[in-house]
Amino acid sequence: MSESNPVIDPVQSSERERRNGHSGRIVWLKGLSGAGKSTLAVALERRLFDEGRQVCVLDGDIVRAGLCEDLGFSAEDRTENIRRIGEVARLLAGAGLLALTVMPWSATSSARARVSCTTAPLLVAYGVRFARPTRPSVLARLMMML
């Protein structure tokens, strides 16, 4: 670290990576309703947290109750909901966290593309059989990607 003034010396991403032991990323979990996206996200969050990683789940349904409570369910409002979640995820990833975002299958790629400045794998939960968090192979594949 340089001997510059700490008040005006911003924290660099490399410093965050050293402290956290990983870089910040956005993981998009996208799938049909009832596919197990939220269940998988929570299981993955627990596993990553227990390994000492900085991780947070952003579930579209939960975020709607606060940050997006002013939005309805029109096509425009759904896009705005996803945009807001993407922006929060981008901020979290920029701060060095792993942001696990849960999105409906209908989430537009254009809304996700706006936050693509952070390298992020796209994970798709196709159905309950695939997303069941008790399957070690699913969690193992996810862990290898982070």
Image (cartoon, rainbow, N blue to C red):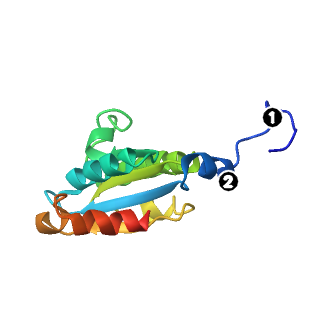
Name the quarter where the C terminus is drawn.
Answer: bottom left
- Mark 2 or mark 1: whose residue is earlier in sequence: 1
- Residue most toward the top? 7
- Horizontal arrangement in the rendering, residue 82 relative to residue 62 (left or right): right
**Residue 105 visible in the snapshot:** no
How many angstroms separate mark 2 from mark 1 (CA)? 17 Å
Circle 1: is it few (<14), some (14-19), or many (20+) Cα within 10 Å? few
Q: Residue at x 45, y 57 (%)?
A: 26
Q: Secondary structure at mark 1?
A: loop
Q: Residue at x 20, y 69 (%)?
A: 126
Q: Amino acid at mark 2?
A: Ser
Q: Amino acid at mark 1?
A: Ile
Q: Residue at x 70, y 42 (%)?
A: 11
Which residue, given by chain and number where applicable, does mark 2 sit on? 14
- Horizontal arrangement in the rendering, residue 48 relative to residue 9 (left or right): left
The residue nearer to you, when weighing 72 against 114, is 114
Provide residue 141's location: percent of width, then percent of height.
Answer: 32, 69
Provide residue 131's location: percent of width, then percent of height.
Answer: 19, 63
Query: Mark 2 and 1 residues: CB-CB less than 8 Å, in contact?
Result: no
- Horizontal arrangement in the rendering, residue 92 relative to residue 77 (left or right): right
Q: Secondary structure at mark 2?
A: helix
Foreground mark, 2 or 1, reads: 2
Circle 2: is it few (<14), some (14-19), or many (20+) Cα within 10 Å? few
Establish if 69 lies above or below 36.
above
Name the quarter where the N terminus is drawn.
Answer: top right
Dot label at residue 8? 1
Q: Quadrant of residue 29?
A: bottom left
The residue nearer to you, when weighing 25 against 15, is 15
